[in-house]
Amino acid sequence: MARPVEKEQQENEFNERLVGINRVAKVVKGGRRFGFAALMVVGDGKGRVGFGHGKAKEVPDAIRKATEAAKRNIVRVPLREGRTLHHDIKGRYGAGKVLLRAAPTGTGIIAGGPMRAIFEALGIQDVVAKAVGTSNPYNMVRATFDALQNVESPRQIASRRGKKVSSIVASRESGKASGSEDLSEE
């Protein structure tokens, strides 16, 4: 009896965002048969997000299939202070390239279309993003996920390099300070 309640709570914890719906036509002897393809993004607002694609004869069925696919493809992304990325990162899929930059508090989500849906579902509050090369939502979503899967937290970097987290964070802060000095000299 506890199982249905757990499943219901799990379904309710995700934010669902519809990124796009395509109507496709198949020409047959009697005319055209229409189908629909949906692209969905789901996330918990706390660093977990996934995307899915579903096709069906009716829009609600396509959305349901896409949502189920998105819940199966969830990835965890480490966030700094639960509001932005740890570092700048590039992603690529096909002709789609994206650049994601960490931003200071109060910046908001500066991103277009499909990327905005991903960041809102992920729980990022401050980020600057730029898509280059394509406006195809499927490729933009996949390029964004390519970038997000390569985000590393200072804890992950420290464990890989055998250092302390404080030394990694300190070097990041000193890098920012020296980077700003270089800009003022030019």
Image (cartoon, rainbow, N blue to C red):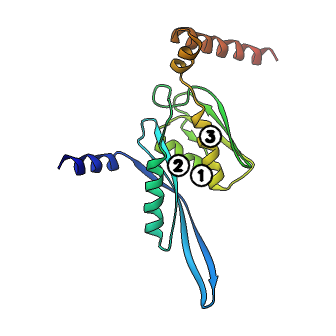
Residue identified by numbered label 2: 117
Residue identified by numbered label 3: 146
| Amino acid under disc 3 | Asp
Residue at image location 62% in from the left, 37% down from the top:
147
Task: State how many labels appear.
Answer: 3
| Amino acid under disc 1 | Gly
Residue at image location 64% in from the left, 10% down from the top:
174
- Which sits in the foreground, 75 or 109? 75
79 on left or right of 30: left
- Which sits in the foreground, 80 or 54? 54
Could you say which disc has been placed on residue 113 in the image?
A: 1
- Which sits in the foreground, 71 or 14? 71
Q: Position of residue 130 (x, y in %)?
A: 67, 42
Q: Position of residue 162 (x, y in %)?
A: 56, 10
* Mark 1 burial class by Cα count in 10 Å: few <14, some 14-19, many 20+: some
Q: Which element is circle 3 on?
A: helix
Between discs 1 and 3, the one toward the N terminus:
1
Name the mark nearer the viewer: 1 or 3: 3
* Mark 2 burial class by Cα count in 10 Å: few <14, some 14-19, many 20+: many
Q: Which element is circle 2 on?
A: helix
User: Quadrant where the C terminus lies?
Assistant: top right
Q: Please determine whether, in this image, residue 174 is positioned above or below residue 135.
A: above
Could you say which disc has been placed on residue 144 in the image?
A: none
